[in-house]
Image: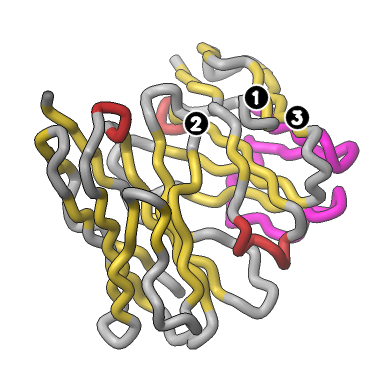
Amino acid sequence: AQTVTQSQPEMSVQEAETVTLSCTYDTSESDYYLFWYKQPPSRQMILVIRQEAYKQQNATENRFSVNFQKAAKSFSLKISDSQLGDAAMYFCAYRRGGGGNKLVFGAGTILRVKS
Amino acid sequence: ETGVTQTPRHLVMGMTNKKSLKCEQHLGHNAMYWYKQSAKKPLELMFVYNFKEQTENNSVPSRFSPECPNSSHLFLHLHTLQPEDSALYLCASSQDRRQVERGYTFGSGTRLTVV
């Protein structure tokens, strides 16, 4: 079974600085997708960024980028120029390709942003 | 408002009560999901419905009973719950279970407390 591990229960970053959240996963599949979701205090889960395993290029979305290391099964999220609104719980998630629909989530990392 | 609405937002119930959680989406999605979010644990997938048909039940106890009368509505009927069932219950939807790479759209969840 696939598993997703987020080893950092909590992280802090100073406003305007950069922070990296870690995620590793375990799978025997070669075709899969990886996601980062953000859950602010409003509880709304919001998709931040996704990565297709067959793409070598790391995904980027404005201030958010990933470092996808397929061989190491690592998928970290980098947030640049951190803002107060980035404070939230961040979840890493995995979904296998080929029609599978289940998203497997990690336990989450709480990100605190200091002004 | 993301398009997935969950009611009620908060629910306190006794162990002998029967209650229902409701999820509604008008995004034209045809796959819907129930997740359980407990503190410091990964999100747990409970049920998956695709075109109103249940396609996955992740060994969920029978005291949780899902119902999907149409592609826009999903219910979770609760009866004889235990205190350890207290959690945030999240509903999500997607265009099609084969297109989950586009990500889920989540509701804001129902915070359930069993006393």
Say if the magenta span includes residue B52: yes
Amino acid carrying label 3: it is: Glu
Residue B90: x %, y % from top left: 56, 35
Dot 1 falls on a residue whose secondary structure is: strand
Q: Which mark is residue B6?
A: 1
Residue A91: x %, y % from top left: 37, 49
Q: Residues within 10 Å of mark 2 (few under 14, many from 20)?
A: some
- Kindly check if marks 3 and 1 are in contact, taking CB atoms under 8 A apart as contact: yes
Q: Chain of mark 3?
A: B
- Residue displayed at 34% across by 82% down: A70
- Residue under label 2: A44
- Mark in front: 3 vs 2: 2
- Residue displayed at 50% across by 84% down: A54
- B61 with respect to A92 (left or right): right
| Magenta segment | B50-78
Say if the magenta span includes residue A12: no
- B59 with respect to A9 (left or right): right
Q: What's the distance in space between the residues labelled 3 and 2, CA to CA? A: 15 Å
Near-viewer residue (A33 or B66): A33
- A93 with respect to A25 (left or right): right
Q: Chain of mark 2?
A: A
